[in-house]
Image: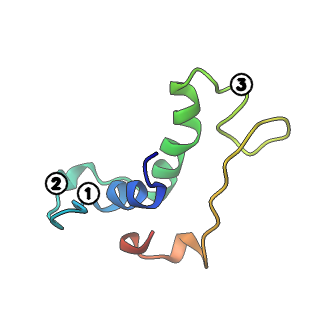
Amino acid sequence: MPNFCEGLTAMLTRRSLATGEVFGAEEIIGLGQALATYTTAGAWQDHAEDWKGRLTPGRVADLVVFEGNLLRTPAERS
């Protein structure tokens, strides 16, 4: 299973985890779009948007708890 934090950091920085080199800097996305990629878009790709992908009553969820405010965390530490 992919590491959520590594994937999130890669979307926010486009920096290779192996080399530190930035690839496709013009494709950097914001935190909101990156989180949607893992949640609503992921559920849609699974054809499961009716029962997962959002934190609403009756849906399943995997949770990630971050220390501190994710909106104030530098992308390299996401």
Q: CA distance from mark 3 to mark 1?
A: 31 Å
Which amino acid type corresponds to the residue marked 1 in the rendered image? Arg
Crowd rating for badge 2 (residues with CA inside 10 Å; few <14, some 14–19, many 20+): few
Residue at disc 1, secondary structure: loop
Q: Name the N-terminal-most of marks 3 and 2.
A: 2
Q: Name the N-terminal-most of marks 3 and 1.
A: 1
Could you say where residue 53 lies in the image, as x and y percent from the top left? 64, 38
Q: Which residue is mark 2?
A: 23
Identify the image quadrant of the C terminus. Answer: bottom left
Going by the picture, which residue comes out furthest to the right? 57
Side (left or right) of 34 relative to 66: left
Which amino acid type corresponds to the residue marked 2 in the rendered image? Phe
Residue at disc 2, secondary structure: loop
Could you say where residue 34 lies in the image, as x and y percent from the top left? 45, 50
Q: Is residue 71 above or below residue 30?
A: below
Which amino acid type corresponds to the residue marked 3 in the rendered image? Asp
